[in-house]
């Protein structure tokens, strides 16, 4: 589904991504790990149009997307979350989801004035879809709560639900487990598995929590110094001497 070829991105004299080549298969949950400064988040920023690459190519479903702006990437049904959730704090949990779909009739003043029934029906459909996703991520009971009042873990679940409102084919998750307690972590992992199973969504996940990565992701890609160091099943990555030296520090010896 995603094919990254010899990608490079520098900031001044620092080469954050150094001829990185990797691929993500359709309907997989692929983990992306590596030490701080390995280039993982920079790679996400290039793949989603926030940065333009200095060199290399990115293909999504066979079509080249490197250099496209973020809104064009989004329209190709590629979505992402961020390390720090970006919720609309003064809106309710339900409203956070309902603002996501593009082209809503109520956004056009003439439709609101002269076609109110059409606008109302569309809003009801969007509301129903949003409630279904809130049920899936176990936030249904908090639908009327202001998003700013959610815990850090609940905000991560809200971020995931927001991305799903865009009906994506490929989702980049940037450290979804950071700051999340173990109970919500299990809920997050189960939600990701269910979305892959029910909707065929493909995930590429940056994560430092090795327990989450090893139980959820297959394959696992390891980055170091801006390029791919290793790739394989979780068991292979656990025992790879290069990975243990560069990142895991002997945790799985």
Image (cartoon, rainbow, N blue to C red):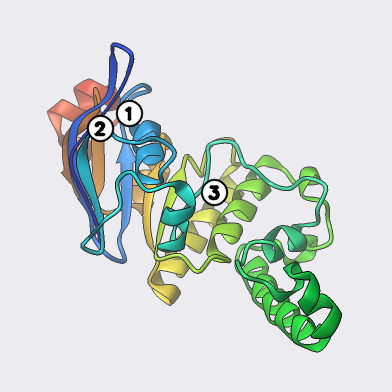
**First in sequence: mark 3 vs mark 1:** 1
The answer to which quarter of the image holds residue 228 is: top left
Question: Which residue position is annotated with label 2?
Answer: 223
Quadrant of the drawing holding the N terminus: bottom left
Distance of label 3 from label 2 (alpha carbons): 23 Å
Residue lying farthest front? 110
Return the residue nearer the eye: 6 or 86: 6
Q: Identify the residue at horizontal 43%, vertical 47% (top origin).
A: 69
Question: Which residue position is annotated with label 3?
Answer: 185
Question: Which residue position is annotated with label 1?
Answer: 39
Residue lying farthest top? 13
Return the residue nearer the eye: 23 or 150: 23
| CB atoms of marks 2 and 1 within 8 Å | yes
Distance of label 3 from label 1 (alpha carbons): 24 Å
Judged from the image, the secondary structure of the residue bearing numbered disc 1 is: loop
Judged from the image, the secondary structure of the residue bearing numbered disc 3 is: helix
């Amino acid at each position: 589904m995603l094919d990254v070829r010899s990608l490079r991105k520098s900031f001044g004299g620092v080469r954050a991504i150094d001829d990185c080549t990797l691929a993500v298969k359709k309907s997989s949950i692929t983990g992306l790990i590596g030490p701080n400064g390995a280039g993982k988040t920079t790679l996400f920023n290039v793949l989603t149009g926030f940065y333009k690459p200095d060199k290399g190519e990115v293909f999504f479903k066979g079509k080249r997307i490197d250099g496209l702006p973020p809104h064009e990437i989004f329209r190709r049904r590629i979505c992402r979350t961020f390390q720090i959730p970006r919720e609309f704090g003064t809106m309710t949990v339900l409203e956070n989801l309902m603002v996501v779909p593009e082209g809503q009739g109520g956004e056009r003043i003439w439709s609101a004035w002269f076609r109110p029934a059409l606008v109302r029906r569309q809003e009801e459909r969007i509301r129903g879809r949003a409630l279904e996703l809130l049920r899936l991520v176990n936030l249904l009971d908090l639908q009327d709560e202001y998003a700013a009042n959610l815990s850090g873990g609940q905000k991560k679940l809200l971020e995931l639900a927001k991305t799903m409102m865009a009906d994506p084919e490929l989702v980049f998750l940037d450290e979804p487990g950071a700051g999340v307690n173990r109970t919500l972590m299990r809920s997050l992992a189960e939600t990701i598995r269910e979305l892959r199973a029910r909707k065929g969504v493909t995930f590429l996940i940056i994560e430092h929590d090795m327990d989450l990565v090893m139980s959820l992701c297959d394959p696992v890609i390891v980055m170091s110094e801006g390029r791919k160091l290793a790739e394989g099943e979780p068991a292979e990555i656990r025992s790879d001497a290069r990975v243990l030296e560069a990142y895991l520090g002997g945790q799985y010896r």
